Image: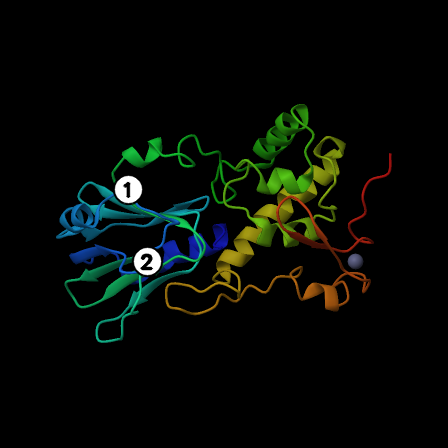
Amino acid sequence: MFELPEFLTLARQVNQVLAGKTVQSGSLGNSPHKFVWYNRTPEEFAALTQGKFVGTAYTRGKWLFIPLEPGYLLTFGECGGRILHHPAGTPLPEKYHLLIHFTDGDALSAMTQMWGAMELYEKGAELQRQYIKGMRTTPADPEFTPEYFSALVQETAGGKKRSVKGLLTQDALIPGLGNAITQDILFLARLHPRHPVDALDGVEIGRLYTAIVDTIREAARLGGRNDETDLFNQPGSYQRLMDHNAVSRPCPSCGGKVEKIQYLGGACYFCPSCQPLPVN
Ligand SMILES: [Zn+2]
């Protein structure tokens, strides 16, 4: 599934190759899939997209927004799979969940893996959609400052008992983070996934903040993770430190053995020496 670095990469690439193009025709899926969330019928989608031009794309959390001017916004959210640019004259995929032809012969296709939203809104109406409405500050926003993060940790520690993995992956407290990038963030912050949020001291909060911002920035700079593909159907160049291959490698920091646990809806990979649970 795409996380914030992959969505940031897609937005950047849409702006490189699709900005300003005019839609010749837009169609929704020839490959039925009950976990693709549409908010338009194929007829509505075709009628509303025709003749619109692509504005400046942007990302928030796990959502990619592509303005179709004037007045509309195409969104891809909470998804993985393939969102691809097809230069004029190159073959198109046989199956797709969304396909847009542009007047210059280029095309954009999307095919989700698992699930995901492909929705078209009148600009502004997307802000009422579940998961977009009231979205918190994301690590790519300038408002994601050490002070903001520290206040978020205090707020989180005051509620139900939460671990740092929960802080990073649950309830969209930090939109855009998912189980994949979280493993590297916790490794760099030297925190065990189960480390209770209310046991974090000031130094650990600072380390976690830096690990989040640095990891997102680096992964986005490298075009996302190497187990996802970008708009040009190329894998990203960001190689995770702590993924399923890590259990057969020594810890990159201390050379010790990396462990795997199932915790909060996904596998966690961590070094028990570098990321010990606090004793109390
Ligand atoms: Zn280690």
Q: Are marks 1 and 2 in contact (CB under 8 Å)?
A: no
Looking at the rendered structure, the kind of residue marked 1 is Asn
Q: Residue 79, percent across and down? A: 43, 51
Whether ligand 1 has any atom under 8 Å from the Cβ at mark 1 is answered as: no
Label 1 vs label 2, nearer the camera = 1
In percent of the image, x 76 and y 33: which residue is there? Answer: 199
Q: Secondary structure at mark 1?
A: loop
Per the image, the residue denoted by label 2 is 14
Q: Locate residue 234 relative to residue 159 in the image: left or right.
A: left
In percent of the image, x 57 and y 47: which residue is there? Answer: 213
Q: Secondary structure at mark 2?
A: helix
Ligand 1 - quadrant of the structure image: bottom right
Residue 180 vs 91, above or below: the answer is above
Cα separation between marks 1 and 2? 22 Å
Taking the view exactly as shown, the residue that stands out farthest to the right is: 280
Q: Locate residue 271 relative to residue 159 in the image: left or right.
A: right
For the residue pair 262 and 104, the one nearer the viewer reads as: 262
Whether ligand 1 has any atom under 8 Å from the Cβ at mark 2 is answered as: no
Per the image, the residue denoted by label 1 is 39
